[in-house]
Amino acid sequence: GIQVEQSPPDLILQEGANSTLRCNFSDSVNNLQWFHQNPWGQLINLFYIPSGTKQNGRLSATTVATERYSLLYISSSQTTDSGVYFCAVLKTSYDKVIFGPGTSLSVIP
Amino acid sequence: KAGVTQTPRYLIKTRGQQVTLSCSPISGHRSVSWYQQTPGQGLQFLFEYFSETQRNKGNFPGRFSGRQFSNSRSEMNVSTLELGDSALYLCASSLGGDPRVNEQFFGPGTRLTVL
């Protein structure tokens, strides 16, 4: 099956700093999502981005499908950005969604 | 449009008991997937139901089962609970068709504690 890796596994930032999270996947996919899991466990949709670039406020994401990776950019980080960021991929509707192991982000004041 | 709802939100059970968790997907969504998340672990896929049929299954023992009703609501059942079943159980809903437009949306989860 598809392997999904995320880096770095842990990240500590000072408030206001920028960061880049990476997601690598081992096979072509038709679907890629980024999620933020807040401290209460809720998974929040950030981006649905099988290819191309999207931006939403301080967050943006780029997926280069031909090279099998996706990047999540967080600019001017805030303490509320703390939590775990997951990427998830899907190849076909007959496959299961594969989640990466996550990047744990802590933003300190 | 209402989001994905899960009930109950919190549950405490003792070893050997069984438990049933419920998930109501977003209106119009036909796929419901279940995940288990234990402390420090990622999301472990349990199973996916699409139009009342189990379409995919993860590597969990037979004590874990599920079903989906004609209105797309889904339940999962865990029998003979073990301490290791203590976890956050998350449900996700999606349209379930073409993966290119198959965005998943998660419910708030059910936190199960087994004593």
Image (cartoon, coloured by chain):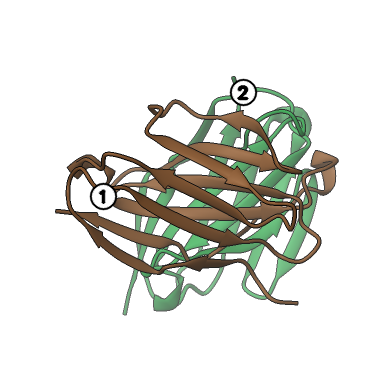
Residue B80: percent from the left, percent from the top? 27, 39
Residue B113: percent from the left, percent from the top? 24, 57
Q: Residues within 10 Å of mark 1 (few under 14, many from 20)?
A: many
Colour displayed for chain A in the image of the structure: green
Q: Which residue is mark 2?
A: A26
Residue visible at 37% across and 70% down? Answer: A40
Residue visible at 63% across and 33% down? Answer: A96
- Labels 1, 2: front one: 1
- In the rendered view, does A89 fall on the left or right side of B40? right
Q: Which residue is mark 1?
A: B86
Q: Is residue B91 visible?
A: yes
Say what secondary structure mark 1 lies in: loop
Residue B72 placement: quadrant: bottom right
Colour displayed for chain B in the image of the structure: brown
Q: Amino acid at mark 1?
A: Ser
Chain of the residue on which disc 2 is drawn:
A
Give the camera-side residue of A21 and B38: B38
Residue visible at 65% across and 43% down? Answer: A70
Residue A73 placement: quadrant: bottom right
Q: Are marks 1 and 2 on the same chain?
A: no
The vertical placement of A53 against A9, above or below, is below
